[in-house]
Amino acid sequence: MKPSFADIRIPIEPDNPAVRREESLCIKCGQCRQVCERDIAVGRLYALKSTNDTAICVHCGQCANVCPVDSIKEVYEYGEVRQAIEDPEKIVIFSTSPSVRVGHGEEFGYPAGSFVEGKMVAALRSLGADYVLDTNFAANLTIMEEASELVERVTKKTKPLPQFTSCCPAWVKFAETFYPEILPHISSAKSPIGMQGPTIKTYFAQKNNLDTSKIVNVAVTPCTAKKFEIQRGEMNISSVSNGAEDMRDMDYVITTRELARWLREEGRDLRDMPESPYDSLMGAASGAGVIFGNTGGVMEAAARTAYYLITGENPPEDYLNLAPVRGMDGIREAEVVIGDVPLRLAVIHGLEHARQFIKRMADGGKNYDFVEVMTCPGGCIGGGGQPKTEVPMTD
Ligand code: SF4
């Protein structure tokens, strides 16, 4: 049957890997539909012939984030993680994304944006983590890959420009579904979680003498779309490295809200936790990883790394003048010159803005070299699995 938006709500397929609706709780307020149409654009593009009139969800979870009665929720995975912890054979390794450490506190009464990294790490240890690592480590790997590819595209013209970022799985699915012609433009670099998983199951396991087959990798993220991303067929490169049949790189994803729910079920309060550091080896990273959580962060980190790759030196403090791409406007632009290489940059958050931007490019507007796209308002800091605080978005 043809899906229709005549109904006030968005439809959610029963096998959606990221979000579920509990029918009995729905009050038909229409907020899920509003955010899906207004910010994410999927609501508008939905019935295109290219999708065979099929409901396409990009799994961003913004519907869950705005649902006032918790009718729509992320698909909970913390039960499976708890079972893995109870199994003495398993080695459970948590990796936390940049936005969780500034989102998690709000669930326990801290002011929004409070930095609770040490308490968050301690909370994960109290739940039985064998190791707690920082996904910022892999964010550094992603940015090195992404910047190297950008420099190659710009200087050697190996692939088409502009290069779009690839670290937001909801954006990647949006492009695959509605704009397949753009795929050669999307960076081939995996997302930070896509790199963290196999790096743990190869490099980290070897350095710590761990039996890889016993490792259970858990990503703690602001993002519901990561639940979809880790299930993609290609996210099993650990199988190749370890000669295993089907070893997933990352086994589970739990959101910031899910972690808080789990802690409350266990009768634990973040405020009572001591401070604890990450484990070493993959628990340290540069500032480039930290800014990944904000809209514009990936672009800024990539531009600074490209500067280093082109000139062999770190950029002076204010040389790149990236101020125009900071802030909350839906589409921001800047131009910088690195050595004698000019770079035209754009930063987009909200897929409705991406839709407008792609249309503008197709209509013969300006050319660009590097474009960052994040699905959620404000970037991952406003992710679908974060505490329910509205992040403002301006047109
Ligand atoms: Fe996930 Fe971040 Fe993309 Fe939102 S912007 S869907 S939180 S990766």
Image (cartoon, grey):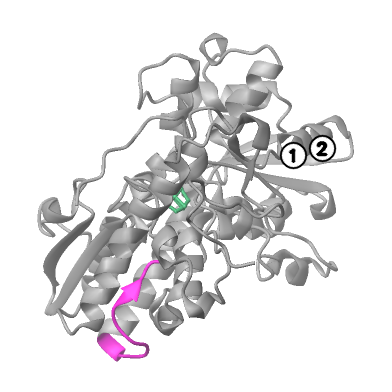
Give residue 122's position: percent from left, percent from top.
59, 22
What amino acid does circle 2 point to? Ala
| Residue 92: numbered disc | 1
Q: Is residue 187 magenta?
A: no
The label nearer to you, 1 versus 2, is 2
- Which residue position is annotated with label 2? 84
Residue drawn 47% across the image and 37% down it:
65
Q: Main secondary structure of the magenta part?
A: loop
Give residue 7's position: percent from left, percent from top.
51, 50
Q: Are marks 1 and 2 in contact (CB under 8 Å)?
A: yes
Between 226 and 187, the residue placed more toward the observer is 226
Residue drawn 46% across the image and 30% down it:
387
Above or below, comparing residue 88 to residue 184 in the picture? above
Give residue 36's position: percent from left, percent from top.
43, 52
Asked whether the viewer can see residue 88, the reply is: yes
Q: Is residue 95 left or right of residue 42?
A: right
User: Helix, strand, or loop for circle 1?
Assistant: strand
User: Helix, strand, or loop for circle 2?
Assistant: helix
Of labels 1 and 2, earlier in sequence is 2
On the image, which quarter does residue 358 sit in?
A: bottom left
Residue bounds of the magenta highlight: 155-165
Q: Whole-Å distance between the Cαs marked 1 and 2?
A: 7 Å
Asked whether the viewer can see residue 39, the reply is: no
